[in-house]
Structure formats: structure tokens, C-alpha cells
Amino acid sequence: MKTLYLVRHAKSSRDDPSLADKDRPLDDRGHRDAPKMGKRLAKRDAKPDLILSSPALRALATAEIIAEALGYPLEDIEVNDSLYASDADTLLSVIHQLGDKLDRVMLVGHNPELSELAHRLASEITDMPTCAVAEFGFDSTSWSDVGKAKPEKVALDHPKKS
């Protein structure tokens, strides 16, 4: 079984227009929502073997906050440039290249590509709000099957969901 978590970064600040897009930090809501989602994931016993994050500050901050809640070592978060300003096909390529010894992988990135990929994997997911987590369980031994086989399990959670 392979479990894929797609995590859209928490709400970011646009207060400083002089900052490059990659350097935008989380805003107050983002700092509230990311720990909330981390706690929810911990309650569901989500234990990723690998967390991959976009290099953008807001995504990496989200990854670190969630990792902390899950007891995942912050130094083991891998930054992957392909998760920033990409598309669903690029994300799928990153997934297909994962080592098959990994069973649970979390990708932390951005919209619209995360929503597009989530929708491609499960048509019932049409949008991922900020700090949303989509979880997919595949009855497979290889990451290369993701996107070809339908997931056995699909769940979507986000901060405003009760």
C-alpha cells in the first residue's frame, strides 16, 4: 500500500510587495491553520516516510510545522525545486521517481497544480483550500502506478472543515 499526502501550504502574507514570491511568509491564519492540520494528521496516525517541500518559504514553513506535529525530523524534510511553479504532470513525475521502499510520502506545495493533481487522482476533489490535505491510498507496491490506478482510499481535510 502506498499513501500519498498532498498538502497545500497554509495562508501566506502579501503584506510586503517588495518580497519575491518565493520569500512570502505565512500570515497569522497560516500560523494557526498549519498546527491545526498537523494535529489532525497526528490523530489519524499519519507517519510519512518522506516529506518533500517546495522551496518557497510559505510551503517550507507549512512542512516544518506539520512535521513537528507528526514527530518527523525537520532536517529530513527534502526541498524539491520541482514542487514550485510547476504543473500536475511535473508533480506526478516527482511521485513516479520515488523509491518503492517508501510507503507514505507527503508533498507540500501550491495551487493550482496540487488541486489539478488531486482532481486527476480522484475526480471528487475539485479544489484544495489553503492548508488542505488530500490523502490517497493506492493498492500498489510501486509509486509509478500512481495516476494509472484508482486510489483505494481518498480523503480531503482542510482547516475550515469541522
Image (cartoon, rainbow, N blue to C red):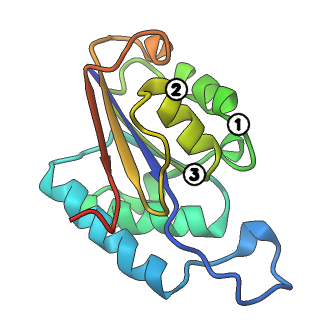
N-terminal-most mark, 1 or 3: 1
Task: Determine the CA span between mark 1 and mark 3.
Answer: 11 Å
User: Which quadrant is the C terminus positioned in?
Assistant: bottom left
- The numbered disc on residue 87 is 1
Q: Secondary structure at mark 1?
A: loop
Look at 42% across and 38% down and name the residue there: 125
Q: Dot 2: within a 10 Å radius of its alpha carbon, few (fewer than 14), some, or many (20 or more) residues? A: some
| Circle 2 residue | 120
Look at 15% across and 50% down and name the residue there: 44
Q: Dot 1: within a 10 Å radius of its alpha carbon, few (fewer than 14), some, or many (20 or more) residues? A: some
| Circle 3 residue | 109
N-terminal-most mark, 2 or 1: 1
Please provide percent x and percent y for residue 39: 22, 65
User: Which quadrant is the N terminus positioned in?
Assistant: top left
Q: Amino acid at mark 3?
A: Gly
- Specify the quadrant of the image occupied by residue 155: top left
Left/right of residue 147 with respect to residue 132 in the rendered view: right
N-terminal-most mark, 3 or 2: 3
62 above or below 106? below
